Image (cartoon, grey):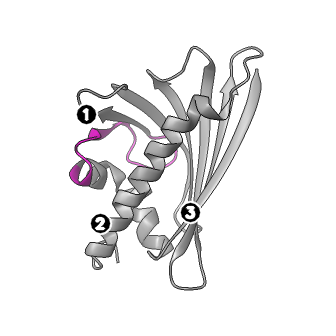
Amino acid sequence: MGVTTYTQEFTTPIAPSRMFKALIVDSHNLIPKIAPQGIKSIEFVEGDGGAGSIKVTNFAEGGHLKSVKHKIDALDTENLVCKYTLIEGDVIFDKIESVVYEVQFLPSGDGGCVCKMTSEYHTKGDVELKEEDIKQGKEKAMGLYKVVEEYLLANPDVYA
């Protein structure tokens, strides 16, 4: 089994605690509300959102994915870090055993934050992943972050 790691980051004028609450802590409520064209629902099938919880994301009709299942490995609400694992889904599981994500929201000097994301792709056998294999997923994730950012900019009291 091989491991391929990708990191990416983006900056936003939104405070780190607000981004963390919107994208991590309350995503199951917020995301389907502000991005129904992409995400139909997010439901906890085990636990209450803390470490050990399992949530299923159901995508809107017509997309290339039906659903994915994530397990929350660690949730640090003080340091604004979440680590979770993609454990099931109709993504490229012919090549991938699992994907471990870590997302951290750090303060930037201007009151906003830097969101750092690390994705560890654990591949089957000696499969080698190329950037284009995961490009679409990364682009969708960045699009979702932008939708949340726009929503929080337009609603400054939400998660304040």
For marks 2 and 3 on the same chain, the one whose residue lies earlier in the sequence: 3
Quarter assignment of residue 151: bottom left
Q: Residue at x 25, y 26 (%)?
A: 62
- Residue type of the residue flagged with mark 3: Phe
For marks 1 and 2 on the same chain, the one whose residue lies earlier in the sequence: 1
Q: Nearer the viewer, residue 117 or 44?
A: 117
Q: Residue at x 44, y 74 (%)?
A: 14
**Helix, strand or loop for disc 1:** loop
User: Mark on residue 60?
Assistant: 1
Q: Residues within 10 Å of mark 2 (few under 14, many from 20)?
A: some
Where is 104 relative to 92, above or below?
Answer: below
Give the residue at mark 3. Answer: 10
Where is 133 relative to 11, above or below?
Answer: above
**Helix, strand or loop for disc 2:** helix
- Residue type of the residue flagged with mark 2: Tyr
Q: Which residues are magenta?
A: 33-53
Quarter assignment of residue 100: top right
Q: Residue at x 46, y 72 (%)?
A: 17
Q: Residue at x 62, y 21 (%)?
A: 97
Q: Residues within 10 Å of mark 1 (few under 14, many from 20)?
A: some
Give the residue at mark 2. Answer: 151
